[in-house]
Amino acid sequence: MTTLLTNARLIDPDALTETTGSVLVKDGLIAGIGEVEAPDSATVIDCGGKCLAPGIVDIGVKVGEPGERHKESFRSAGLAAAAGGVTTIIARPDTNPAIDNPETLEFVTRRAREASPVRIRHMAALTKGREGREMTEIGFLLDAGAIAFTDCDHVVTDTKVLNRALSYAKSLGALVMGHPQEPGLSNGGATTSGKFASLRGLPGVSPMAERIGFDRDMGMVEMTGAKYHFDQITTARALPPLERAKKNGFDVTAGTSIHHLTLNEFDVGDYRTFFKVKPPLRSEDDRMAVVEAVASGLIDIISSMHTPQDEESKRLPFEEAASGAVGLETFLPAAMRLYHSGHLSLPQLFRAMSLNPAKRLGLPQGRLAEGAPADLVLFDPDAPFVLDRFKLRSKSKNTPFDGARMQGKVRMTFVAGQKVYDAEAAHADL
């Protein structure tokens, strides 16, 4: 099948350019870019001057299968991703049971392939049961298709176990992803400590917990030489040591979540539990420091950290409510806040949302280049709307953006050249 997408604003995250032109798609790959003539057999789609970019590669998505299918299934996550311009989901292993053996990994891989319209790759747990006591069979899990290893927000406190796991991962060339938090300081914290938390009577966690967690993990990376990705850097205090680590040549990258880039601690003021995420929302100074770190390339990756929670776990007092927010469908419009505020250009955003995560994971996606997979998103960065959480395709509706005025709508999403979402068709179905 051959498709020509014409009259588009082409967002190239590799060259950091924005140009006007066409993209030719043939047999699931990009066959031409720029001034391209349509072959006789091609289907021509006029993009109407809207933006065409590589599909988003979203690291750290929680899917409820197995164990919590009522919160999110591979089918619902895939539909939400397609509607949000996410063409590759990198799923977390914090399921019930955890993805800590080849059999469970093969089960979820098969279920994802059967149910989802977008690509789904899986990370596996670093330790058995994510309990931090015994490392998983990293070699067998790699053979079964694990793309990286992480215990998610369960920090491995036993440094001997972590040392052993990182050393083994290093010998196999496996990527390890860690959550930079000192668990003792973080325990029980519902918001970032400070005057605002005190005035609201909420238990806080110091931003230093992130810095201490970062320094501990970085020491282990220095000892073992492992490939390491810090999943969420959210404070200004963690940025100088991150910069030093990169300058010293260690194989480390860092990410942050779209919620920490677009919201701050004041958003929890009405005790709305949809704003309770992990780590907690930070000060405005921290938020702006992290935005600048993304712009400079110090922070490599932006992700949604999609964490579905059911109504029962969110309709509780703020301290007791579960952490997390869904983000697959709101990822792109939330990112447009950074574009419209002038903090990040569209190529910079897609460098962090598409290109860098694909490069870190060794995937061919995330590029607007000849020969790359035709995983593409066509979107209107200026289209305004008011978000209604009940219209989200995710099974769980826990978004902090409910009722918010937003800009940026996905028009079409393509995976391997196949259209998996069309806004006009979706609107007609409603």
Image (tube, grey):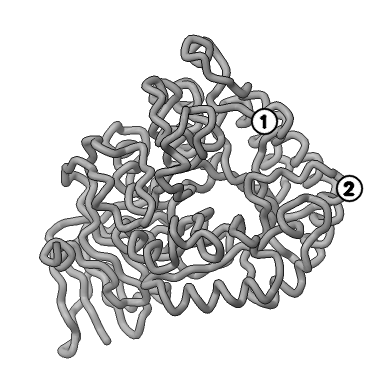
Q: Is 111 above or below relative to 327?
A: below
Coordinates of residue 362 in the picture (x, y in percent)? 58, 66
Of 150 and 365, nearer the camera is 150
Identity, as a three-letter code, of the amino acid under mark 1: Asn
Front: mark 1 or 2: 1
Identity, as a three-letter code, of the amino acid under mark 2: Lys
Instruction: Check residue 160 in the rendering and tell me which mark sits there, or answer none.
Output: 2
Give the SS element for disc 2: helix
Coordinates of residue 374 in the picture (x, y in percent)? 36, 73
Tell me which residue sits at (51%, 14%) in the image: 201
Q: Please give the residue where the numbered disc 1 appears in the rendered image.
A: 187
Distance from the alpha carbon under mark 1 to that under mark 2: 22 Å
Tell me which residue sits at (48%, 39%) in the image: 294
Nearest to N terminus: mark 1 or mark 2? 2
Of 61 and 391, nearer the camera is 391
Tell me which residue sits at (55%, 74%) in the image: 109
Give the SS element for disc 1: loop
